[in-house]
Amino acid sequence: MRRIIPLLLMAGLTGCGVAGRLENVGRPPKMTPPPADPVAPVIEPSLGDQAAAHRAGMRGRAQPQAAPTASLFRTGAGAFFHDQRASRVGDVLTIRINIADKAVLDNSTTRSRTGAETAGLSSLFGLESQLVKVLPGHPDPSKLVDSSSNSTSSGAGNTARSEQINTTIAAIVTDVLPNGNLMVQARQEVRVNFELRELVVSGIVRPEDIARDNSILHSQIAEARISYGGRGQLTDAQQQRWGQQIYDALFPF
């Protein structure tokens, strides 16, 4: 028993994140490392380079490969008349988030119930006189049972919520579905002093909904998952202590 109690205390402290918080004392929150190898489409070489290589193969001589140029007519390069909107894995898409939600909910419930029961045995073939000998306290047979009950319950609840987020974030196309829709994902982290603000967006985008400036509204993203929060000293100060959280979870009243 003496060994079990310290183990339970250590498990409780570890599960509540105390070890991680003690480790980060005096340190700013860590930022998530960027992906090591972002996926990007392969740019095809210039048609002129292909023709030169073909001629070199025909002559049986190896020609040095020309350095890539910034020509607008090179395959895979940007062009004046080419659609620059995101369409392939690795392309970047701008997401405009404009959330302004407000909800007010007010509930009130009142319940009351009253009951009374009375029972007696005035006469029963003279047997009622024998009850005095059996029951203690010399009761009156005509008033054997007399009970009453009263129950009252009332409850009230009020919820007011107001959220507003206005920001812009760049997302990357992670996959192209068979019907042509794009799966996008974005992550942005901003650290100011000892507070880290994190914005995560993911969902499915139709290519037809992407504007000409390669941007899309958050309301046009299917299966959208938008998470905006923070980590650091300010967020930690707004949270209840782990002991109070356990007490609120276990206290039945």
Image: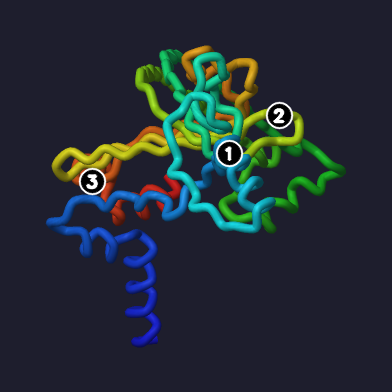
Q: Which residue is drawn at the image coordinates 43% and 17% (left, top)? A: 99
Which residue type carries mark 2? Gly
Residue labelled with disc 3: 232
Name which quarter of the figure residue 126 lies in: top right
Indicate whether 38 appears above or below 192: below
Q: Nearer the viewer, residue 57 or 251?
A: 57
State the quadrant of the N terminus: bottom left
- Taking the image as shown, residue 217 lies to the left or right of residue 23, namely right
Residue 108 position in % (x across, y down): 49, 17
Residue 89 image label: 1
Distance from the alpha carbon under mark 2 to that under mark 1: 11 Å
Which SS class for mark 1? loop
Q: Secondary structure at mark 3?
A: strand
Disc 2 or 1, which lies upstream in sequence? 1
Please name the amino acid that badge 3 sits on: Gly
Q: CA distance from mark 2 to mark 3?
A: 40 Å
Q: Is residue 107 visible?
A: no
Report the front residue among 154 and 190. 190
Q: Which mark is residue 180?
A: 2
Amino acid identity at mark 1: Val
